[in-house]
Image (cartoon, helix red, strand yellow):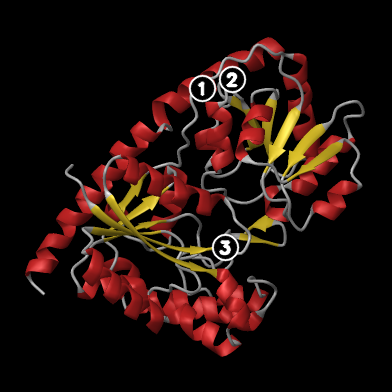
Amino acid sequence: MSRLRVLVAHNSYQMRGGEDAVVDAEVVLLCSRGHAVTEYRRHNDELRDMRTLAAALDTLWSRRTSRDLGKLIAEARPDVIHAHNTFPLISPSLYWAADRRGIPVVQTLHNFRLMCPQAMFLRAGRVCEDCLGRFPWPAVRHRCYRGSAPQTAVLASMIGVHRMIGTYRTKVSRYIALTEFSRTKFIAGGLPGEQISVKPNFVDLPVTENERQRSGALFVGRLSPEKGTRVLARAAATRRHAVIDVIGTGPEQSSLEASPGIRLLGWQVPATIYTRMREATCLVVPSIWYENFPRTVVEAFACGLPVIASRLGAMVEIVRDGETGLLFEAGNADDLAQKMAWAENNPAAMREMGANARREYEARYTPAVNYRQLMTIYADAIAAARPRASNP
């Protein structure tokens, strides 16, 4: 495809996470291939200076986004707009601003926000699909977003209103789901299947020879309940002489500090994380929600590190049990402890799984593979928008 002008839109989180890293990586990827990238970024730190009513109204429809996008489109003349997170400050007004000017929109679906106000299909520590395919009033009743009925109602209204006026069906040219599992959920939630492509996350990590013997389990991620940190702590407590290194910060940090078998390493720069991934026996992903596609799993595969993950949602698709890692019953600490013990006692099998994981990375998750997928999606979006642009 010829060089494109791409406008990338993203609402950054107050605590930087995987979505922010994915956006940055895609911008670098596009620029490295010679495409002209213009970024429209807003940051949730802005909420500190906003009144509650103003923030609620911006979630439904941001007049600032409409103005900003109009100006940026006129200046940058993008061929396509690639939206990532639009909640809460950018809002769905982005799609309408683009549509008025005949610019196709590609929307990456990093979470389940378009169907679940809480974005994770998780309630009271269990998977919950009460709002799937319906107006999300159950979420308001259960106060699913930050334990607040008013805040949840704002999100439910955003989802419901924009479903009703056709925003998600008619103003987005192509959606990107990160896995086939996620794609099926979005279709069940009402998005048009023919407009949803699957493109996973990627990382750029060249092969590095590792002469050291691998040892120990590793967890990398936000220390929060949905990541299964309590399951991890219970599993660690049953393994008296084994220690799990935990890299990350979050609300569960204080409780993990008192957990036997857990060694907290805090936040680390990527280079340090990759070094530890090349030394560990396995990466543990004990999430209790439908992970879309944890970037840490791609990083582990690139480092030749097999993954022990919950047998839940997309993880069953990403981690091939017995080939690139092991799966355990989600939420079952005893099962997780058994899988970690098996990994420790079978180093040769784990090394083979690690080699398989690196081959999986090279086949599916490199920048080159991801770039080809992204260009195909952009081409489809641009082609789909041409009839509307020629017949306003």
Q: Which residue is mark 2?
A: 354
Residue 328 shows in the view: no
Q: Amino acid at mark 2?
A: Gly
Q: Which residue is mark 3?
A: 13
SS under mark 3: loop
Q: At x 22% / y 71%, what residue is drawn?
A: 74
How crowded is the residue under tag 3: few (<14 C-alpha within 10 Å), some, or many (20+)?
some
Q: Which residue is mark 1?
A: 358
Q: Amino acid at mark 1?
A: Arg
Residue 258 at what x, y percent from top left? 92, 47
Residue 236 at what x, y percent from top left? 84, 36
Q: Nearer the viewer, residue 133 or 200?
A: 200
Decide: marks 2, 1 in contact (CB < 8 A)?
Answer: yes
Residue 350 placement, left or right of 315: right
Q: Nearer the viewer, residue 205 or 196?
A: 205
The vertical placement of 348 against 73, above or below, is above
Residue 202 at what x, y percent from top left? 45, 38
Which residue is the extreme one toward the left?
390
Work out whether mark 3 precedes mark 2 in sequence or the reverse, and give the earlier one. Answer: 3
SS under mark 2: helix
Residue 244 placement, left or right of 77: right
